[in-house]
């Protein structure tokens, strides 16, 4: 059957060439478009459906076999030389099916560290390298566009997809995403930066209305996208599922055209998130060029719209052109012969090394870490130590060949692990997983996070034995999350059994003068304030990809020095986070009725709508401005060594501020330091401003003990601006700005001042426009 289809395509293509029809890439693009039938144009702006979803969204023809397990394809028109191109997830690596029917070969991909870990490296070159490796797998497995990176703001610690995202801060989000895009696209494959925009909760994700002021939009929620578009030219942008101030983002001309194209000069293609939005005509008009994965209903609506004049055909042509311009750049169009054999071994080394740089050492009393040479026998507690979590669930998951557990990572590093304890845990995990298995009736079960096993509480006797037999204790706490559902406060807090385990292990080991290390294998923030005094050291290892156990062992053993810092605040209590006043906490599942969003509702707070009442005061902007205590501040992270900051200076030239500072490694080990530059606006500034805002950052190269590096950080006058809603203008007030050079948001090493002159940049107020549209629709 497959062969027959391929022959038909070949014959059609040959016929096309010989019949003199304009061919994509040979004839001018407009000529190709004018040779397309209306039906072909509509087919092209609507994807070919999604395997596994029947009826409305059956896969058209042969394209589902191009790369099995890819999220979508575009519609091929062989007679005009237009191939189908393949779109595949995702942020932590390529997500395709690892096996194929009747094929003995395997198609595993590398599971790289999650987005949050990558951002915690604060290392743009490193993220670019990881992007290169991910993009290479996309290329070699036949994908044309990677559906990544994901850069929504961590507005609240409970968002189920925070693991895919980068930070509560837009500068980090934008810079890290731009580095990722550059890396992936250096392979000649595309990216789709997502989810544009304000997709900060999973609860009711396809219907929730995010209600946000234009200032918070511009300064917090859109800023990262602005930076990424301007600094890395992603091929495509993916609109988000949610409404924004009453309009679906995929139907918002203001977001997709006024801002993205007219203000930021984006010249690629926009696609929907899968089954996102409601009105295909409005989507076409807004500049949402392609609807993915595409349904027959959308096809019919657009076709009918053109026929009855509701949709101007020139708009359809414009969108078709943008899609064709992207297709022209793809490996598939260029006839790239992919190998299906990326160098998985080399990429395993990339993920193993990169992960160590994003791990954040939260506590290290009396240099408990790195483990000293006399530590040989490790007592390993916590179910997650034996069942390590590589990443989150849903489209951000990667079908990898293996995950190295902490147990195996430590063994590989030469540590001795207790066999009896291992057997006890392994049996317990098997029993717990049987209990936790979701019912088979849930067709989306594979997308949902499986409940973690309840912690095993070793008996007093087992603990006594372990203290006797081991040099040190290690406890891993794990959390997993993913699409469709947000985490709950219970998931944020430690469970009773986890707390008891920590207490019992610490008590028993400390009584014998032995240390206890906690490893956090988490995708999002958890509560740490109530228990952080118990262990000697805490390493936040995030979800470190398939080599996780090896990466953690590299850090624990001192082979690599941890150099990550937090890209979000760890609040003392969940309710300390100001956004908690307006965020769903009941863990309710979003509807899986794709393609049928239903009527817009406005009754239920934090479900039908969410008010972003905290406005621009997200994360540290809130905690630091209002002097709230936190468990660990934004930008925080320890090292195995120490650094001294000297000779901080600032110079101003043509409205560009350059801060330089010398960073010296004053401790015993080699290490890298992350230097953060915050700015405080003058008191007399016209607008309410946060106490400080991150404006630039850099990471040193690895410094040997005694070595010094000079860091230069630049900030433009435009970067100091705040968004004035009344005049729809970016305004930089004149006056004396304070530049704070910090090793975290709460550890400022040098304070400098410089004068800025006033400047303004007028924009279109997209909120006002949206309000007008709403009025018209009523
Ligand atoms: C996710 C996107 C993803 C798409 C395709 C959606 O459910 O929100 O991030 O790219 O599926 O798998």
Image (cartoon, rainbow, N blue to C red):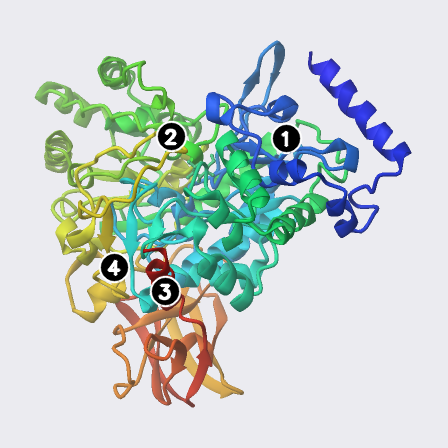
Q: Reading the chain from its start, which is encountered first: label 1 or label 4? A: 1
- CB contact under 8 Å: marks 3 and 4: no
The quadrant where ligand 1 appears is top left
Is any atom of residue 596 visible in this view?
yes
Tags 2 and 4 in contact by the CB under 8 Å rule? no
Ligand 1 contact, mark 2 (Cβ < 8 Å): no
Q: Can residue 704 be seen in the rendering of this structure?
A: no
In front of the other: label 1 or label 3? Answer: 3
Q: Residue furthest top?
A: 102
Q: Which residue is mark 2?
A: 410
Earlier sequence position, callout 1 versus callout 3: 1
Left or right: residue 208 compared with residue 290: left
Name the residue that disc number 1 marks: 141
* Residue found farthest to the front: 308
Q: Does residue 98 appear left or right of residue 599 in this picture?
A: right
Q: Secondary structure at mark 4?
A: loop
Q: Residue 656: x percent and y percent? A: 50, 82
**On the image, numbered disc 4 is attached to which residue?**
633
Q: Nearer the viewer, residue 647 or 465?
A: 647
Labels 3, 4: front one: 3
């Amino acid at each position: 059957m497959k062969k027959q289809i391929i022959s038909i395509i070949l014959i059609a293509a040959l016929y096309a060439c010989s019949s003199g029809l304009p061919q994509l890439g040979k004839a001018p693009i407009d000529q190709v478009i004018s040779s397309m039938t209306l039906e072909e144009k509509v087919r092209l702006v609507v994807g070919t459906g999604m395997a596994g979803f029947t009826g409305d969204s059956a896969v058209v023809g042969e394209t589902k076999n191009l790369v099995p397990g890819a999220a979508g394809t575009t519609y091929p028109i062989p007679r005009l030389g237009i191939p189908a191109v393949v779109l595949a997830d995702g942020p932590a690596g390529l997500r395709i099916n690892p096996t194929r029917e009747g094929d003995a070969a395997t198609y595993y991909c590398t599971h790289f560290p999650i987005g949050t870990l990558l951002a915690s490296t604060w290392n743009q070159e490193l993220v670019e390298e990881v992007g290169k490796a991910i993009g290479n797998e996309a290329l070699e497995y036949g994908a044309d566009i990677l559906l990544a990176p994901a850069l929504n703001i961590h507005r609240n610690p409970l968002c189920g997809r925070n693991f895919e995202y980068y930070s509560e801060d837009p500068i980090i989000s934008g810079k890290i995403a731009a580095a990722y895009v550059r890396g992936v696209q250096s392979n000649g494959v595309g990216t789709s930066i997502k989810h544009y925009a304000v997709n900060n909760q999973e609860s009711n994700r396809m219907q929730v209305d995010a209600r946000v002021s234009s200032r918070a939009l511009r300064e917090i929620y859109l800023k990262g996208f602005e930076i990424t578009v301007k600094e890395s030219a992603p091929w495509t942008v993916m609109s988000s599922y949610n409404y924004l101030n009453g309009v679906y983002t995929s139907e918002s001309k203001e977001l997709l055209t006024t801002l993205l194209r007219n203000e930021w000069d984006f010249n690629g293609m926009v696609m929907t998130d899968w089954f996102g939005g409601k009105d295909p005509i409005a989507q076409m008009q807004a500049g949402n060029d392609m609807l993915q994965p595409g349904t027959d209903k959308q096809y019919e609506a657009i076709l009918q719209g053109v026929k009855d004049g509701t949709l101007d055909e020139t708009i359809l042509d414009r969108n078709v052109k943008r899609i064709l311009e992207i297709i022209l750049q793809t490996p598939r169009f260029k006839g790239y012969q992919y190998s299906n054999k990326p160098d998985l071994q080399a990429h395993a080394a990339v993920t193993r090394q990169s992960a160590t740089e994003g791990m954040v050492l939260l506590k290290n009393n009396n240099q408990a870490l790195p483990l000293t040479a006399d530590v040989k026998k490790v007592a390993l507690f916590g179910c997650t130590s034996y069942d390590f979590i590589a990443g989150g669930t849903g489209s951000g998951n990667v079908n990898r060949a293996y995950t190295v557990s902490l147990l195996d990572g430590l063994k590989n590093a030469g540590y001795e692990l207790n066999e009896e304890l291992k057997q006890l845990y392994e049996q317990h995990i098997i029993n717990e997983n049987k209990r936790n298995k979701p019912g088979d009736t849930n067709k989306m079960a594979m997308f949902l996070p499986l409940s973690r096993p309840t912690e095993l509480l070793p008996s007093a006797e087992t603990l006594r034995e372990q203290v006797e037999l081991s040099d040190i204790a290690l406890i891993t706490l794990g959390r997993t999350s993913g699409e469709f559902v947000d985490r709950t406060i219970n998931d944020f807090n430690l469970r009773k059994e986890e707390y008891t385990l920590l207490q019992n292990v610490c008590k028993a080991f400390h009584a014998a003068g032995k240390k206890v290390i906690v490893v956090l294998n988490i995708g999002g923030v958890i509560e740490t304030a109530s228990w952080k005094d118990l262990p000697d050291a805490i390493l936040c290892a995030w979800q470190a990809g398939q080599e996780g156990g090896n990466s953690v062992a590299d850090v624990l053993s001192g082979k690599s020095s941890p150099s990550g810092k937090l890209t979000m605040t760890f609040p003392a209590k969940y309710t300390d986070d100001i956004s908690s006043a307006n965020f769903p906490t009941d863990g309710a599942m979003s509807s899986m009725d794709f393609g049928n969003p239903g009527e817009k509702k406005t009754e239920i707070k934090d479900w039908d709508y969410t008010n972003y009442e905290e406005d621009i005061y997200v994360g540290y902007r809130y905690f630091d401005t209002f002097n709230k205590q936190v468990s660990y501040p934004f930008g925080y992270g320890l090292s195995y060594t120490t650094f001294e900051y000297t000779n901080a200076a600032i110079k101003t030239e043509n409205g560009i501020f350059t801060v330089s500072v010398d960073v010296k490694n004053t401790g015993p080990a080699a290490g890298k330091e992350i230097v953060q530059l915050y700015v405080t606006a003058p008191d007399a500034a016209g607008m309410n401003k946060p106490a400080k805002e991150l404006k630039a950052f850099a990471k040193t190269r690895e410094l040997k003990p005694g070595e010094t590096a000079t860091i230069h950080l630049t900030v433009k006058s435009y970067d100091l601006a705040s968004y004035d809603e009344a005049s729809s203008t970016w305004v930089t007030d004149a006056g004396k700005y304070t530049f704070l050079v910090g090793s975290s948001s709460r550890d400022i090493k040098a304070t400098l001042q410089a004068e800025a002159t006033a400047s303004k940049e007028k924009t279109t107020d997209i909120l006002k426009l949206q309000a007008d549209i709403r009025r018209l629709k009523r």
